Amino acid sequence: MIKKKIILDDIQEEDLLKARIRDLPVSIKGTWLEECIKELYNELNDKGIEFKPVCYLADEWLAPDGEPVVGIPFFLAHPVLMRLEKQMMLDVEGGTKAWCMKLLRHETGHAINYAYKLHAKKKWQELFGHFYKEYKDTYRFRPFSKSFVRHLEDHYAQYHPDEDFAETFSVWLTPGLEWREEYKGWKALQKLKFVDELMRNVKSKQPLRKKGKKYWQASKLTSTLGNYYKKKRRAYAEDFHDFHDLNLKTIFQEKTQDEKPRLFAYTLIKKYRKNLINIAWKWTGEKKYIIDRLLKILIIRCKDLNLVVADDEALAMIKISTYVSSLMMKYMYTGRLKGKK
């Protein structure tokens, strides 16, 4: 039986979700990603760094632990897949050139760290911490700390010593960024100066590891797109049960049988859903899918509780948007939307 070739520009969404990732006709060559990688290599050349990490399509942004290579999400290689990612996750990580370059620099920081085993240096460990420190599912960060550079969202440098180095390297590599002036007076400047010194020492040297294994390579992934998004969405999901009920009853009001018609609370949230997502995203920087997932649960609970809007819409919007944003801040600091029981 001859397998039908997938044509992404013509395929229906239902059939696309049934397609295996390995069967998707995507590659870096000839796409906007190729230009981004070329720009990355030019940035490395401008700094005198001979090592250029190999880039490949993977299931997400990554530099596999210890491997001097860079994985780029496969969905960035075609507009149809980018639109599907947007539909499923409400955002496309690295979907603009500026964002893509930020992530490429970050993953390159990891790759160079692994290629030269920089993390084995005593000074590296003194400044960044222990490389083999366990990665936790969540992390708490200090938003106003001057011990870390600010590059990717969520103060990602504070997540782990390896991420701290990759973020510091990214800032150092960014063209046109006067990091000595930008971070003047910051403790993070000591890290940037160390990276500058490190790169001067290794830039013309051959790496200890020239090649790396391309883990989670898109061309080998047997999962269908449907299952891929089920798992991806589940990774951000959380079981809320009736945790929100008391707060929702404070924000809104339970409808009585003889009460005159009022706007239902779930109708208000659905009506201003996009506004609520954008407000919470603007002030917290949290992923839009996480925010939308929360709103869907609030809609269900408001409907089940038969809640109505007791205030005018503007005041009700202030109350619910404040509640959503506060929950997102809690999630960012603790990794949870609710405390442990």
Image (cartoon, rainbow, N blue to C red):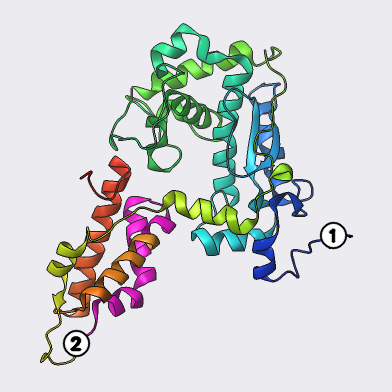
- In which quadrant will I find the C terminus? top left
Identified at 28% across, 34% down, the residue is 142
Tell me the mark number nearer the camera, choosing from 1 and 2. 1
Q: Is residue 174 visible?
A: no
Residue 109, image quadrant: top right
**Residue hosting label 2:** 262
The number of discs equals: 2
Magenta-colored span = 262-291
Dominant SS in magenta: helix
Residue 252, image quadrant: bottom left
- Kind of residue sitting beneath label 1: Lys
Q: Secondary structure at mark 2?
A: loop
Q: Which mark is residue 253?
A: none
Identified at 26% across, 69% down, the residue is 301
**Residue hosting label 1:** 3
* Crowd rating for badge 1 (residues with CA inside 10 Å; few <14, some 14–19, many 20+): few
Residue closer to the observer: 313 or 195: 313
Q: From what the image shows, is residue 170 above or below residue 95?
A: above
